[in-house]
């Protein structure tokens, strides 16, 4: 382990994790290595992102999870996969450069989600302005958002019902889910691109959205599907 890493990390003190007593006999560097191995093994074996709280149970509160992750990621440089912060935890993900090779070898991902352009844009709007009602979505785009479109996004697990709106009739609002974060490789909603920056870069036009210029049909029946993969 690099000297710079050791200095940055500081002394390796005894932790209070689930198995810490097993490591009391080890010197500091060997103990840190064992913590790295246990953290990486736990993340590797999990089917979902592993939260900080779960990892803390293994290494103890006195051990820095962030520094452990940093050291693991340093050792993964040059490997075809990385340790990525996503959906409030950490998960092993293959690097984008190998996506085509993986698709060629094993086909499409099991969790691939086909969305129309309209569904992608509605999902984007929900992500940025949640909680938001179907009526508010319709007003935003200038066209009615169908229940079928909302149902498809719900069926894909990308959105869920949020709190009821305080407006007359108390309609349900919609919010994005953990599956949404996983699908788009986000750790939290704070990782969404800045809305104004998207406009400034010419990637999004609020004026066109409001005019309905870029969304001719919200039924999704006539549009080409856009495949989203893990």
Image (cartoon, rainbow, N blue to C red):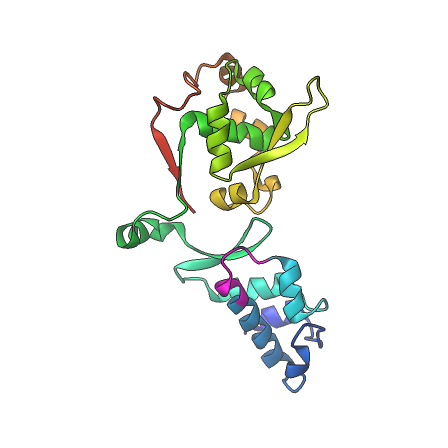
Q: From where the camera sits, is residue 163 visible?
A: yes
| Along the line of sight, the residue nearer the viewer: 67 or 55 | 55
Q: Quadrant of the N terminus?
A: bottom right
Which residue appears at 50% of the width and 18% of the height?
209
Q: Is residue 64 above or below residue 221?
A: below
| Along the line of sight, the residue nearer the viewer: 5 or 215 | 215
Q: From where the camera sits, is residue 202 visible?
A: no
| Along the line of sight, the residue nearer the viewer: 39 or 76 | 39
Residue 227 x %, y %: 37, 37
The image quarter containing residue 226 is: top left
The answer to whether residue 18 is left or right of residue 181 is right
Residue 155 x %, y %: 48, 36
The answer to whether residue 74 is left or right of residue 217 is right
Which residue appears at 61% of the width and 57% of the height?
51
Seen as rendered, the residue at the extreme bottom is: 25
Number of callouts: 0
The image quarter containing residue 171 is: top right
The answer to whether residue 50 is left or right of residue 226 is right
Which residue appears at 58% of the width and 73% of the height?
3
Q: Is residue 184 above or below residue 50?
A: above
Residue 82 x %, y %: 46, 58
Span of residues in magenta = 42-50
Which residue appears at 67% of the width and 77% of the height?
20
- Is residue 192 in the magenta section? no
Q: Is residue 68 above or below residue 197?
A: below
């Amino acid at each position: 382990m690099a000297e710079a890493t050791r200095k940055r990390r500081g002394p390796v003190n005894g932790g209070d994790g689930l198995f810490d007593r097993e490591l009391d006999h080890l010197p500091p560097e060997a103990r840190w290595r064992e913590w790295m191995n246990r953290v990486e093994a736990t993340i590797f074996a999990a089917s979902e992102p592993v939260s900080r709280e779960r990892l803390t149970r293994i290494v103890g509160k006195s051990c820095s999870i962030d520094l452990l992750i940093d050291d693991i990621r340093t050792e993964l440089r040059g490997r075809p996969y990385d340790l990525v912060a996503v959906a409030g935890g950490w998960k092993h993900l293959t690097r984008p450069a190998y996506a085509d090779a993986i698709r060629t070898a094993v086909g499409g991902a099991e969790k691939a989600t086909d969305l129309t352009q309209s569904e992608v844009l509605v999902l984007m709007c929900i992500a940025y302005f949640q909680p938001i009602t179907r009526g508010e979505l319709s007003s935003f785009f200038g066209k009615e958002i169908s229940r079928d479109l909302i149902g498809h996004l719900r069926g894909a697990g990308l959105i869920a019902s949020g709190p009821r709106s305080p407006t007359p009739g108390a309609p349900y609002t919609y919010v994005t889910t953990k599956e949404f974060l996983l699908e788009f490789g986000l750790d939290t909603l704070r990782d969404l691109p800045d809305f104004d920056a998207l406009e400034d870069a010419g990637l999004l036009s609020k004026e066109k959205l409001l005019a309905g210029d870029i969304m001719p049909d919200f039924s999704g029946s006539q549009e080409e599907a856009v495949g989203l993969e893990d």
